[in-house]
Image (cartoon, rainbow, N blue to C red):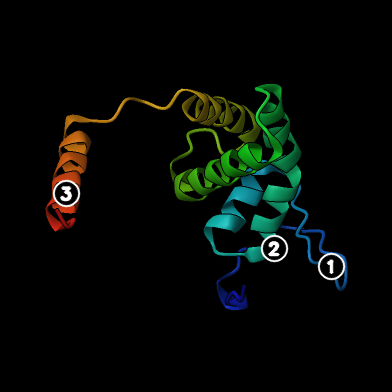
Amino acid sequence: MFYDMERCFMPPNPVVPEGSTHYIAYSDRDLVRACLEGTQLAWNELVERYGRLVYSICRHYQLSPAQADSVFLRVFTVAFHQLANLQYQASLSPWLITTTYHECRLFIHPPPPSAEQIQHWQIQHAIYQAGRPA
């Protein structure tokens, strides 16, 4: 993925080893700021820094590797969309732990379908039945 270097936020004294594909910030707050500014290396570092934590929680819930991968992707998708709204940007791990816990629970026990969803399925089934040869 490409990003605009002029838009990138680099905290004071960042550590970016020459030729590295990782952005190493000194704090979560710096990392979040860099992610919000669109720095791809910062996002890579965030996922690298917290990926094992998220995956280990998924495995704690005895999700299969494929299920854990699905929850992992969901957690980081939620993180991507919610970074700007985090109340405590200086400490990502508690938020990621809570989010992962909720996503695992939703994966294990999905909520029942809404009345609208059931109605949609019934309409789709009626359309299917009407189009079948007698």
User: Which element is circle 1 on?
Assistant: loop
| Amino acid under disc 1 | Ser
**Residue 118 on image: x %, y %:** 20, 34
Q: Are marks 1 and 2 in contact (CB under 8 Å)?
A: yes
Cα distance between the residues tagged 1 and 2: 9 Å
For this rendering, which residue is in front, 49 or 118? 118
Q: Measuring 13% from the left and 46% from the top, which residue is drawn there?
A: 126
The numbered mark, 1 or 2, whose residue comes first in the sequence reads 1
Position of residue 12 relative to residue 93, above or below, is below
Q: Which residue is mark 1?
A: 20
Q: Residue 103 at x, y = what percent?
A: 51, 31
Q: Residue 123: x, y in percent?
A: 14, 45
What kind of residue is marked 3? Gln
Judge whether 132 appears above or below 108 on screen. below
Q: Secondary structure at mark 2?
A: helix
User: Which residue of the protein is positioned furthest toward the right in this rendering?
Assistant: 18
Q: Which residue is mark 2?
A: 41
Which residue is under mark 3? 129
Disc 3 vs disc 2: which is toward the camera?
3
Say if mark 1 contacts mark 3, CB within 8 Å: no
Q: Rounded to the nearest whole Å, what is the CA distance between mark 1 and mark 3?
A: 58 Å
Query: In the rendering, at what x and y percent does residue 21 appear?
Result: 79, 66
